[in-house]
Amino acid sequence: MAAKKPKHLDVIIAGFGGQGVLLIGNLLAYAGMNAGLNVTYIPVYGAEMRGGTANCTVILSSEDIGSPIVHRPQSAIIMNRPSLDKFQPRLLDKGVQIVNSSLIEPRLADTKRVKSVLVPCNGIADKLGNSRMANMVALGAFVAATQIVPLAAVIKSLENVISASYKDLIPKNAQALEAGAAAAQ
């Protein structure tokens, strides 16, 4: 019997402060833990949260993680143009990036060196009735594109990151995750 190939994926998630990039990074980390993977999650706080770019790094691995620092990520979720300009050049060749084509012109996405999955995250979220769920749409697309964790594990992990007073929002967030996954396929 062949040995099971180890899983390992790192991702930088970036956008404007207020787009929920730290929330989906935290959600992805919980999903990884709930799926039995080792995880690191590093959010970037500070002035970025007041309108500049905010970002976080998540590493998911079936093996030990040597360092939580990632200079050249395997993947990215890019929610706005400044984040594309900053992080797309750092992606490893043949990496995967989810690009929010509602806010980023598709022609700006590198489609030769990396796999770019263009998803109109804001547009899909608007159709679902809440533009603030664009982050969940992007994460759903990322999970579908990378298969690092099952989408069901992400949906189940919503209860870990959404506070008790907002538990009624879990079904809508699950719907946004599913819509993002469908858009990426």
Image (cartoon, grey):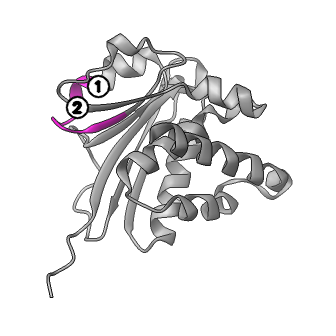
Residue drawn where x is 18% and y is 37% of the image: 92
**Which span of residues is magenta-colored?**
88-97
Residue 43 visible, this angle: no
Determine whether the residue tagged by mark 2 lies in a helix, strand or loop.
Answer: loop
Depicted 4 relative to depicted 61: above or below: below
Q: In the image shown, does 50 or 107 lie closer to the viewer? A: 107
Determine whether the residue tagged by mark 1 lies in a helix, strand or loop.
Answer: helix
Residue 55 percent coordinates (x, y): 45, 34
Residue 132 percent coordinates (x, y): 70, 31
Q: Residues within 10 Å of mark 1 (few under 14, many from 20)?
A: many
Q: CA distance from mark 2 to mark 1?
A: 9 Å
Which label is found at residue 88? Answer: 1
The quarter holding residue 72 reads top left
Which label is found at residue 23? Answer: none
Q: Quadrant of the N terminus?
A: bottom left
- The amino acid type found where label 2 is placed reads Val
The quarter holding residue 128 reads top right
Q: Quadrant of the C terminus?
A: top left
Q: Is residue 79 left or right of residue 157?
A: left
Q: Earlier in the sequence, mark 2 or mark 1?
A: 1
Read off the residue under disc 2: 114
Residue 167 percent coordinates (x, y): 81, 56
Depicted 161 relative to depicted 4: above or below: above
Q: Is residue 41 left or right of residue 176?
A: left
- The amino acid type found where label 1 is placed reads Gln
| Label 2 with label 1: CB-CB less than 8 Å | yes
